[in-house]
Image: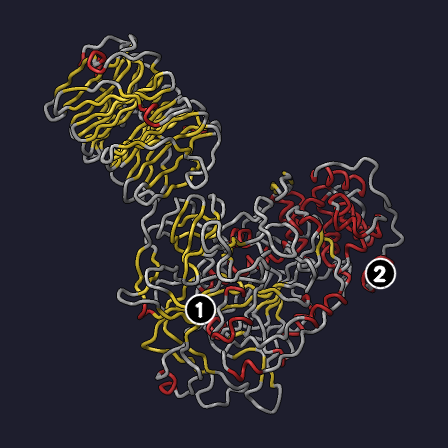
């Protein structure tokens, strides 16, 4: 490696430690501190450089696609091995994607050889500086950090700059770290990397790595401000600004980057650099030239005049020949391939090669070429490469957000796609389609940077949408053939729960047929415990889903496509060409074949997510010659009768005829429709909320909700009430009653607000100790015990007002302290307040709001005495009956009041009927359909049993925190439930 040797020679006069410290620091944070002290480099600089290289990830010593290793991202690229891998690769086909025999037969030259540079060998240089074997820098976080610190110190020495403790003085050294010292520190190569490093330095960063190490970089805005760094809009790491350099849909010249581009072919007036101002960008045009005397034989793109209306997608690619080699490949017209942009890994430089108005040949599918912008990311054909540099993610996400804002491209994974998600235009092209950026591209991180992450989980629903999102961390490392265990961006798909992979799928990284990739949206076909099925490739495809592999997307107003009523299986297409008659009408020849289906179908009853709910007209861009000399050359042919919906069909997109499908709403979510309950529980770390839809057999997963005043009271209890599309919650905090509402259409909770203020229920003279809630018509009744008195306030939602506290104890003639536990329910216009008296006996107060009268009595003689201590009380009224349930020494007893008959039943032993084995500490009850739903806290978990009164049966107790239900949460102390 001549470049590495040259760099090592250049720094051989430096004096550094040649062995690891005698007592190496443990933990990454300590290792950064130790290396900073050893090499006299500011620790904050070392941390910020590593963050912008790898986000402090070691990647277990495996290389990135550009030969970076370990936490400092030091490079070691064997160009001979890269060239050999390129030579052994499958012959490339042209990326015009026209799907014709003549196009498929066209030979394409081998990629240009990668170009050597000191920036490709910083690991070897660092190993020489610290006197350690290169293998140790690849595998050891400590030696990687020491090597990175040594390189920074050497760059500072070469610049004849002092080893200052001021981070601002190290800007030039950071530039040199990025470019391997191969360029003058005043040049632009490496400056964007340095600018981002100082942006991170100014903003600070805190992150837990995939192997569980928590690191913190304190913000230092002063150092960033005093450095030569240009503001790249880094802000808080992990966020990207919204680029607004040109109006949506406009192809006006955007702002020129603030940093001057390096010496290179510059953009012409006709083709300005189209790039957000926060990125370093240049323009190095792809070839546009003939390959022979034939004007039809040319490369590498089509002259066009696209506006934002024609650009719907962004396609992510990676190269295999490095930045310089890939640039040379795209500048050879015989390649028959190009992209609009090429990104450099070392510093995130963005090179534009094709103006966005023109059609680059990058996707291998003419339809996608016509309607997309292609972004290539530097990479090498390296054995074992399994991650991408942070600079690629940062620059690419900023560029994608800029393009999306400019052209109105939705920020979702049906519009920002990988090359591996582009369909084969015709069946003979399917097997030759690419699979980059591959299984190790972190789509979760990328979409977080872009600002297009999925919606929060609101429950998996058959017929609803979900978005695949496995964690890209050590918590999820699927088995991949010939690859060490590591994070990946997909879930495997199976023919049945626990069965074989779908089709003839394998565990090869390149086999896309049995994988659903992060960010892809699908329709839920079935749910069986922890297994979820999606409609995929014309079949049910199952994946293991304990709640962490996907998120539900049940936003209102969404639609899916399904075969039109009366049709069986319908055709699936790989491109969206217009009808034949559109071509002679435009004066151009029709391609042969034109409209041709793939060997796939979409069977009746299945549902798929469309990329657009507005069908697109079939179209074709005719530009057969290099000089526009053909009759009607450079003509956009648009059909009038054939329209398509682009859909997420399998791993790839596809098209279906709008005439073959109906656009139907997604199934309503777990929060609305059917027999359903909502739970609100207090855990040791704060309140959580979940729901169950018994009609659909699905659970909304537990999720945190705000605490009252932001403070957590582990013993805090709640009461819940369904009214219309709202869920109302009440609780007691610091002796005051608070309430909050959840909109079940959106899933959003309001902040908690204090009822004991003027204008609402009003103040109370004593602290509240108990609270319950019930509804009669459009009125919510909040019943409390305060200072030993039974009080009530009402919210009249029809009138839009609160009625202040009334003294029920005074109406009933109850002495202060008569009741110490209460539970309220209502049927019709009658409210029932059940209570446990200080004498241990059960009392009931009934309010008939039609007649304006109250009644009160001790029902112990009617239901019988209880043996033991009553620790919980719950009630629900259905029709003319009231169900009263109590907890006695951890067991559940039930009595029923039949108001039509004017009688009470005796106590029934629900614990015995349900086979209860775990004592309960809290109890709540509701009723849906014909079933009584009991929820209790036992062993710190929420348990559920159901009594079906139509069938006369009870279920046993189930754990709501089990896989396939609402999911795991911390220890639970209280629970409340409401149903409808």
Taking depth in this image into account, of 517 and 860 the one nearest to the observer is 860
Direction from residue 667 to residue 455 in the image, left or right: right
The residue lying toward the viewer, choosing from 812 and 180, is 812
Q: Which one is earlier in the sequence, the residue at label 1 or at label 2?
A: 2
420 relative to 546, above or below? below
Quarter of the image that includes the C terminus = top left
Tell me the residue that label 2 is attached to.
Answer: 5
| Figure quadrant of residue 824 | top left
Relative to 357, residue 889 above or below: above
At x 38%, y 51%, the residue is: 526
Q: Describe the element under mark 1 as helix, strand or loop.
A: helix
Estimate how packed mark 1 is, as few (under 14), some (14 to 19) or many (20 or more) residues with alpha carbons within 10 Å: many
Q: Is residue 855 visible?
A: yes
Disc 1 or disc 2, which is closer to the eye? Answer: 2
Please state the horizontal and vertical placement of residue 138, each as a whole percent of the image: 75, 51
Q: Is residue 157 left or right of residue 317?
A: right
Counting from the top left corner in percent of width and height, residue 444 is at 53, 51
How far apart are labels 1 and 2 at the CA level?
Answer: 49 Å
Label 2 environment density (alpha carbons within 10 Å; few <14, some 14–19, many ≥20): some
Residue occupied by mark 1: 308
Percent x, y of residue 9:
87, 58
* Most distant residue in the bottom direction: 293
Left or right: 869 as drawn, with respect to 303: left
Q: Nearer the viewer, residue 615 or 242?
A: 615
Residue at the image point whose x is 31% and y is 70% from the top: 659
**Disc number placed over residue 378 in the picture, else none:** none
Quadrant of residue 437 within the rendered picture: bottom right
Say left or right for 724 vs 918.
left
């Amino acid at each position: 490696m001549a470049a590495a040797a040259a760099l090592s020679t250049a720094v051989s006069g430096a004096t550094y430690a040649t062995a690891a410290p005698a007592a190496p620091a443990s933990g990454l944070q300590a290792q950064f501190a130790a290396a900073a002290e050893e090499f006299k480099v500011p620790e904050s600089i070392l941390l910020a450089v590593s963050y912008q290289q790898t986000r402090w990830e070691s990647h277990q010593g495996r290389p990135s696609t550009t030969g970076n290793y370990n936490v400092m991202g030091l490079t070691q690229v064997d160009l001979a091995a890269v060239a050999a891998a390129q030579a052994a690769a499958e012959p490339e086909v042209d990326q015009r994607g026209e799907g014709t025999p003549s196009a498929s037969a066209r030979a394409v030259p081998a990629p240009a050889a990668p170009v050597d540079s000191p920036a490709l060998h910083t690991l070897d240089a660092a190993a020489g500086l610290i006197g350690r074997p290169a293998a140790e820098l690849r595998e050891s976080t400590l030696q990687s950090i020491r090597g990175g610190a040594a390189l920074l110190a050497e760059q500072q020495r070469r610049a004849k700059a002092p080893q200052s403790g001021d981070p601002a003085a190290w800007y030039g050294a950071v530039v040199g770290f990025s470019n391997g010292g191969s360029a003058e520190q005043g040049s632009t190569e490496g400056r964007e990397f340095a600018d981002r490093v100082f942006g991170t330095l100014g903003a600070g960063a805190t992150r837990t790595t995939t192997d569980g190490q928590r690191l913190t970089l304190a913000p230092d805005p002063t150092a960033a401000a005093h450095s030569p760094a240009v503001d790249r809009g880094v802000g808080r790491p992990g966020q990207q600004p919204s680029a607004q350099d040109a109006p949506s849909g406009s192809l006006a010249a955007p702002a020129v980057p603030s940093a001057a581009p390096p010496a290179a072919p510059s953009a012409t007036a006709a083709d300005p650099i189209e790039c957000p101002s926060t990125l370093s960008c240049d323009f190095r045009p792809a070839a546009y030239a003939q390959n022979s005397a034939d004007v039809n034989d040319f490369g590498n793109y089509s002259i066009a005049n696209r506006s934002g209306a024609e650009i719907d997608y962004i396609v992510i690619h990676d190269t295999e020949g490095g930045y310089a080699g890939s640039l040379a490949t795209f500048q050879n017209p015989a390649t028959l391939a190009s992209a609009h942009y090429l990104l450099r890994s070392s510093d995130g430089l963005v090179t534009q090669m094709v103006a966005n108005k023109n059609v680059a040949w990058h996707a291998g599918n003419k339809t996608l070429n016509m309607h997309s912008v292609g972004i290539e990311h530097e990479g090498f054909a390296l054995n074992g490469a399994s991650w991408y540099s942070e600079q690629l993610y940062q620059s690419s996400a900023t560029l994608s957000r800029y393009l999306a804002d400019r052209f109105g491209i939705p920020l979702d994974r049906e519009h920002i796609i990988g090359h591996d998600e582009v369909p084969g235009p015709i069946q003979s092209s399917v097997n030759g389609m690419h699979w980059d950026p591959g299984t190790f591209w972190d789509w979760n991180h990328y979409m977080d940077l872009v600002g297009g992450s999925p919606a929060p989980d609101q429950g998996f629903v058959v017929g609803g949408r979900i978005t695949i999102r496995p964690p890209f961390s050590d918590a999820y490392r699927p088995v991949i053939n010939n690859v060490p265990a590591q994070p990946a961006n997909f879930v495997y798909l199976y023919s049945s729960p626990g069965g074989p992979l779908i089709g003839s799928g394998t565990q090869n990284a390149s086999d896309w047929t049995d994988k659903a990739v992060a960010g892809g949206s699908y329709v839920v076909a079935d749910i069986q415990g922890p297994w979820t099925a999606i409609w995929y490739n014309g079949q049910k495809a199952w994946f293991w889903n304990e709640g962490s592999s996907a998120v539900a997307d049940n936003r209102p107003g969404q639609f899916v496509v399904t075969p039109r009523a009366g049709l069986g299986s319908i055709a699936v297409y790989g491109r969206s060409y217009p009808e034949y008659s559109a071509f002679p009408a435009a004066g151009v020849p029709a391609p042969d074949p034109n409209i041709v289906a793939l060997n796939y179908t979409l069977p009746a009853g299945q549902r798929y997510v469309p990329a657009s709910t507005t069908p697109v007209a079939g179209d074709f861009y005719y530009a057969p010659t290099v000089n526009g000399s053909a009759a009607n050359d450079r003509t956009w042919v648009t059909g009038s009768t054939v329209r398509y919906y682009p859909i997420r069909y399998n791993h790839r997109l596809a098209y279906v005829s709008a005439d073959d499908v109906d656009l139907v709403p997604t199934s309503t979510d777990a929060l609305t429709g059917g027999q359903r309950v909502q739970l609100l529980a207090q855990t040791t770390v704060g309140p959580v909320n979940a729901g169950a839809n018994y009609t659909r057999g699905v659970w909304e997963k537990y999720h945190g909700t705000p605490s009252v005043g932001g403070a957590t009271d582990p013993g805090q209890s709640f009461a819940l009430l369904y009214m219309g599309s709202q869920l109302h919650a009440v609780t007691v905090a610091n002796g005051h009653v608070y309430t909050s509402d959840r909109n079940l259409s959106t899933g959003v909770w309001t902040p908690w607000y204090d009822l004991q203020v003027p204008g609402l229920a009003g103040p109370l003279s004593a602290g509240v100790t108990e609270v319950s809630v019930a509804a009669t018509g459009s009125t919510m009744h909040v019943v409390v015990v305060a200072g030993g008195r039974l009080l009530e306030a009402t919210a009249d939602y029809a009138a839009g007002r609160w009625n202040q506290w009334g003294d029920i104890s005074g109406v009933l003639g109850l002495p202060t302290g008569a009741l110490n536990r209460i539970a309220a329910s209502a049927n019709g216009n009658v409210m029932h307040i059940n209570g446990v008296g200080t004498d241990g006996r059960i009392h009931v107060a009934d309010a008939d709001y039609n007649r304006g009268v109250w009644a009160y009595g001790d029902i112990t003689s009617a239901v019988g005495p209880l043996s033991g201590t009553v620790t919980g009380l719950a009630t629900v009224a259905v029709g003319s009956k009231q169900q009263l349930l109590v907890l006695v020494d951890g067991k559940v007893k039930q009595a029923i009041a039949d108001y039509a008959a004017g009688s009470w039943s005796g106590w029934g032993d629900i614990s015995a009927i349900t086979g209860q084995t775990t004592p309960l500490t809290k109890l709540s009850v509701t009723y849906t359909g014909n079933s009584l739903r009991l929820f209790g806290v036992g062993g710190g978990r929420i348990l559920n049993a159901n009594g079906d009164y139509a069938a006369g049966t009870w279920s046993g107790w189930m754990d709501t925190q089990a896989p396939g239900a609402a999911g795991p949460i911390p220890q639970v102390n209280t629970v409340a439930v409401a149903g409808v």
